Amino acid sequence: MKSRYRRILSAVLSTVVLIGGGALILGQRVNAAGEGKITGSVKLNGAAPHMKGIDMSKDPYCAKAHATDPGHLETVVAGANGGLENVVLYISDGLSGSALTDVPTAVPVFDQKNCVYTPHVLAMDIGQKFKVVTSDQTAHNIHPNPNPMTGNIPWNQSQPPGAPPVEKSWKAAEVIPVQCNIHPWMHGWFVVVKGPYATTDSSGAYTINNVPPGSYTVTAWQEEYGTQTQKVTVAGGQSATADFTFKAK
Amino acid sequence: MRRTLRKWSPFIAAAAVFALAPALSAQLTQYDLEPRSGMESHIGNITGHAKDAKADYRRFCVGCHGELGDGNGENFPWLDPKPRDFQLGIFKCRSTPTGTLPTDEDLSNTLARGLDRSNMPQWSNLTKQQRADLVAWVKHFSPRWVSEKPGTPIQIPAEPEVTPERIKAGRDVFAKVQCWKCHGVEGKADGPSAATLTDDQGRPILAFNFTEGARPKCGSTDQDLYKIFMTGLDGTPMPSFADNIKPDEAWDLVFYLKALEPQKSKEKAIAKQLGLKPVDPNAPPPSGQ
């Protein structure tokens, strides 16, 4: 796999990086071709804790939606191979210039579906637009509760059936709890970070794209287990690996 | 401080990595506040000056809202709801959209009105100048007024004539956007979600009961009611419906809310004549949805 082809490619790419570096000195953004990525997986070591079931009987619409597939808490979502879902990975140290300040144009979506938040954890960059939508035929209110001292201000908007999307962004890096007061079991997170980020899929895998060559600290955040960090070095156009393991409590 | 920590403690561990922990636990001190004592307020043609309110605040407010405006006055343990923490800059009664600062006038009106079903007294005995100065003093506690401007007040169109059709339409709005989830089908604050409601500090909070003759905290005129559900009461579960209720429908809803209240009103008389029934939570959504 790590063949000659790859080496040639990297040689070509480092040339691109050199040119890109020159461009940077001239105050331009590094050519995207020089950017690398950080990939890996996040695993849980030990048996996943039992996730309590949710009693949705207060709202017949929600209860019916979960008639055959009962809802349960999503504090720790681990797959068969121990892969941890909903872990946010971001670069907590080492970024500079446009890699730090560029805001992605993609608009991540937070859906209220069958009276649960999909996804349970929505990561985003500072200043990145995100959208809150509802797929449900019951009313929700979407109520993020950041600490106003950070510069992120709480708000609270209703989303009855058929409501238009709510589009917002956040000013500061913060882990923000989100809740629906109508359905008290609905609890999720907006994880606002500075710079490129990724969230693990159901197998625990992730890829942080658009990482310029350099040495970085990668942080993995999991809502129950907290954070872990690792140092990685990304070479131009290459993929660096950082795997994490959280110990089940 | 103690309360701030209680609220965020589950998240502090998670947030620490963002190097925000200092901000999370930091309490503003006299040292932070002093430079802001030049804060002003502008209410009509009156300009309020924070530093002129120092003595009045000591005399009238400090026992509840605390020296540092953090709501931690000596009366804190005995009060429910708790006094507002002015350092957070989050207010219930606003003419401005959810998530934005209230106007100086909103705060001045709150002082003149007091907050019903709480220990927050009415300060109508103070002069307008004193209230304006106090508003400026309240503002100086929160860094929000240094970095942000108040929101743009929502537009309230002229109030239309009450008609039976409008009251019926108002009931359909109450059903459609599901006010009853919290306020109950008869407005008795006994909806299916009422028992589990908590404010932003995680303290239990009751929905408003329309049938007891209580006055809404944020005012009881028709315009006040309109404003309440179109802006929401920030810091509480009461959300903003600005994106979901059209201005004309909003007036219909105001009329229906008045029909729920026990006070004698044109709306109540019409509703009685119509034999208007409470909304049925199990009915299919009103047509057109």
Image (cartoon, rainbow, N blue to C red):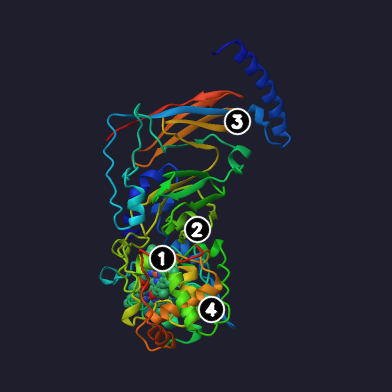
Find the distance from the CA under tag 4 to the CA under tag 2. Answer: 45 Å
Q: Earlier in the sequence, mark 1 or mark 4?
A: 4
Is residue B70 visible in the rendered image? The answer is no
Front position among marks 4 and 2: 2
Furthest-top residue in this view: A4
User: Do the residues marked 4 and 3 share a common chain?
Assistant: no
Q: Earlier in the sequence, mark 2 or mark 3?
A: 2
User: Is disc 4 in contact with disc 2, using a CB cutoff of under 8 Å?
Assistant: no
Among the 4 quarters of the image, the one containing residue A101: top right
* Circle count: 4
Q: Amino acid at mark 4?
A: Gly
User: Is disc 3 in contact with disc 1, using a CB cutoff of under 8 Å?
Assistant: no
User: Is disc 1 in contact with disc 2, using a CB cutoff of under 8 Å?
Assistant: no
Q: Secondary structure at mark 1?
A: loop
Say whether residue A62 is left or right of residue A205: left
Residue A235, label in figure: none
Q: Which residue is mark 3?
A: A212
Find the distance from the CA under tag 2 to the CA under tag 3. Answer: 42 Å
- The subunit letter for the residue under badge 1 reads B
Q: Which residue is mark 4?
A: B48
Residue name at image x 33 percent, y 66 percent: B72
Q: Which residue is mark 1?
A: B178
Q: Residues within 10 Å of mark 3 (few under 14, many from 20)?
A: many
Say whether residue B46 is left or right of residue A70: right
Q: Amino acid at mark 1?
A: Gln
Q: Amino acid at mark 3?
A: Pro
- The subunit letter for the residue under badge 2 reads A
Q: Residues within 10 Å of mark 1 (few under 14, many from 20)?
A: many
Query: How far from the left and from the top, in percent, is residue B243?
Result: 53, 63
